[in-house]
Image (cartoon, coloured by chain):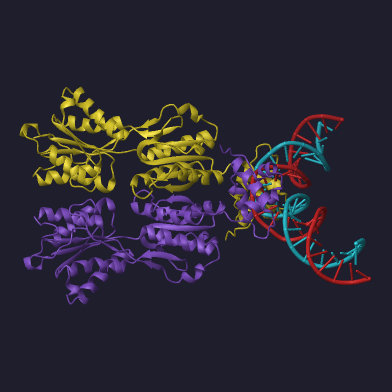
Chain colours: A yellow, B purple, C red, D cyan
Amino acid sequence: MSNKNIGIKDVAVAAGVSVTTVSHVLNEVSYARISRETRDKVRTAAEALGYGPNRLAQALRTQRTGMLGLVSEEIATTPHAGRIILGADEAAKARGYNLMIINTPGSASLESRQADVQALLERRVDGILYATMYHRNVELPDNLGNVPSVLVDSVAIGGNITAVVPDEDGGARAAVGALLDAGHTRVGFINNTDDVPATRQRLQAFRAMLTEAGLDGEAAPVESEVSEVQGGYEAAKRILSRGDRADIPTALFCYNDRMAMGAYRAAAELGLNIPADLSVVGFDDQELIAANLYPGLTTVALPHYEMGAWATEHLIDAIEGKEDLSLMALHPTILGCPLVRRDSVAAPR
Amino acid sequence: MSNKNIGIKDVAVAAGVSVTTVSHVLNEVSYARISRETRDKVRTAAEALGYGPNRLAQALRTQRTGMLGLVSEEIATTPHAGRIILGADEAAKARGYNLMIINTPGSASLESRQADVQALLERRVDGILYATMYHRNVELPDNLGNVPSVLVDSVAIGGNITAVVPDEDGGARAAVGALLDAGHTRVGFINNTDDVPATRQRLQAFRAMLTEAGLDGEAAPVESEVSEVQGGYEAAKRILSRGDRADIPTALFCYNDRMAMGAYRAAAELGLNIPADLSVVGFDDQELIAANLYPGLTTVALPHYEMGAWATEHLIDAIEGKEDLSLMALHPTILGCPLVRRDSVAAPR
DNA sequence: GGACGTGGGAGTCGGATGAGCAACAAGAAC
DNA sequence: GTTCTTGTTGCTCATCCGACTCCCACGTCC
């Protein structure tokens, strides 16, 4: 049906009016005074020809493309990027925008990132979303400042760009709280070794929660390893094989779901049943892992979808002049990390 | 530095030449005769101003946007989409193209898909990649025919559009072959219940391999369940609890990694050690699962990255007139599924 | 003769491109 | 040696891509 080369001009001819009129009608220009009959003629003709506007021409003239650039790190290696993209795509689509996506390796140089942004700029995207693969501090290419931009899942070194990040503290508190609520008094923390905000904030929240519950937060067992399954296994092994039986934790808070997966294996090898002998809670809510472990892993969800959507909403607001991003740039916006209850937490024996 | 509103015009003024000359120089137009000095002047001026072409204006004039549309199902719910996107993005970037991505729910209606394609068409993408979340037969929106298009990971009902799909048969043969090579003579198959090409082809390959090896392929145990962890668990439980001890398989080929994960649990409950008592091979190579199970799961990788890249390469070839897609539309192109060896296969006792 | 009600002309966004023009050199004709 | 062709080199003009939009032109009716 819809052949591609029908322009406003063709519609004008078909309807027997000028292109100006067609434009007025189709865009419902407020000050245009056009009779109902003419309007109908135009609409009918447009419909019949299967007319669709050439967004390029439109954009050239109006200086608005209706496109958002999204530069994302490691699209494929973590499932997280997918959820950010999804959140952004749905929010964008809802407001009539589309996404241009560029992938960049986590290891990319600043110049290469700058080139990515440049590509987006040349295509005149109305704004840019800059997403990282995990919550951290990033150095941004300076040409990012040329259009409204929002950072997703990280904050800029040097600040002053609007950013949205997960509530590490609240998430960790929810996780530890679930353990405490179940009645545990001896809980350990299996932490990551990377120097990222999450490592520090989760540890701090862990200790604080225990202390606030009247336990000795500073003395609670903490073991750090690389944040993978193997690291979780080793850390759990250590933490669960301490000298005095009465010192061994009955609950473990793990830095992420992968490490929790390792803890599951350690528990199995030690003959510990989850959750009867040992309660475990993770972090990330990676569906593939958390929902598929046995028993299902109670964990804390990172709001990737929500961050993508939030960033997109506010970026569009800024583009449309409904909001001033610079006002929000002072402090990153923090989005909640809800607890997802499955079956790995129970009361201690 | 690079302010955004510098056009070819500004460069022309700065260099003291006409815009035509600037255009000629910057695009290295072959028939343009311009002295070295002038060329240098122009380049220097462009550099100094931080000039970047307005791709919209360029596209409007040349009828080439250098953009590829990618409509992908369920970007976030499966990690597969991410790898297709990555393959497409890298291939596109290598040839100077960018990707416009639109997500569509697997359940989207034909009209909604058509609207997605329409959005891409209005932005005048040079071609479209249409990716599904798993290998299957899809009904395509008819406006897809308006630009060169390639189907990724599925074939069209009614055919005649170029498509690229995984080699189900070869992959399944590699998986079963690994088991046979290890010396197993009693191997079972845990299959999916969905009516998709993979279900049929893998089963057929399974039986054929056994028969070719001199075993009774038709009599080999096969259990079908929904293709999730739980289904794999149940199917494995059944297959491993058959009447006669001497009939119980010593090796299992699982429809996918999630089902294999279920088989791991069933084995553990039955006191079967992997791989000593039971060898297992999966399908999909979902990193999060396959590499993180203990022991690491030997599996078959789906070539998502490769399919994305292949589709993009050929799409661009078609766009640039180097190739005729209709010649390839007769049969889908099949890409290999390589075996990924980990530690879940060993010789039977 | 203003005020409406209707609608069209033409310039514009930024860059691409075929046609054309000036300047100068080499060769041809005388 | 002078003048005229013919050819090159070097660069510019004008137009176009498709839609938006400011401003003007009609005809009517009070």
Say if residue B244 shows up in the picture. Answer: no
Q: Residue at point 7% right, 68% down?
A: B246
| B96 or B123: nearer the viewer | B96
Residue B192 location in percent, x, y? 26, 61
A209 or A345: nearer the eye?
A209
Residue B141: x percent and y percent?
A: 48, 59
Q: Nearer the viewer, residue B166 or A230?
A: A230
Q: Based on the displayed image, in which of its 4 quarters is residue B63 positioned?
A: bottom right
Quick one: A224 or B41, which is closer to the camera? B41
Quadrant where the image shows the C terminus of chain A:
top left
Query: Total label count?
Result: 0
Whole-percent x, y for residue B321 in the image: 55, 65
In the rendered image of this protein, does residue B217 appear above or below residue B67? Answer: below
Answer with left or right where residue A283 lies relative to residue A104.
Answer: left
Q: Quadrant of residue B125?
A: bottom right
Q: Quadrant of the N terminus of chain A?
A: bottom right
Q: What x and y, as percent, mark residue B34? A: 69, 54
Instruction: Work out whether residue B39 can be spotted.
Output: yes
Q: Toward which corner of the image does residue D28 lie, by quadrant?
A: top right
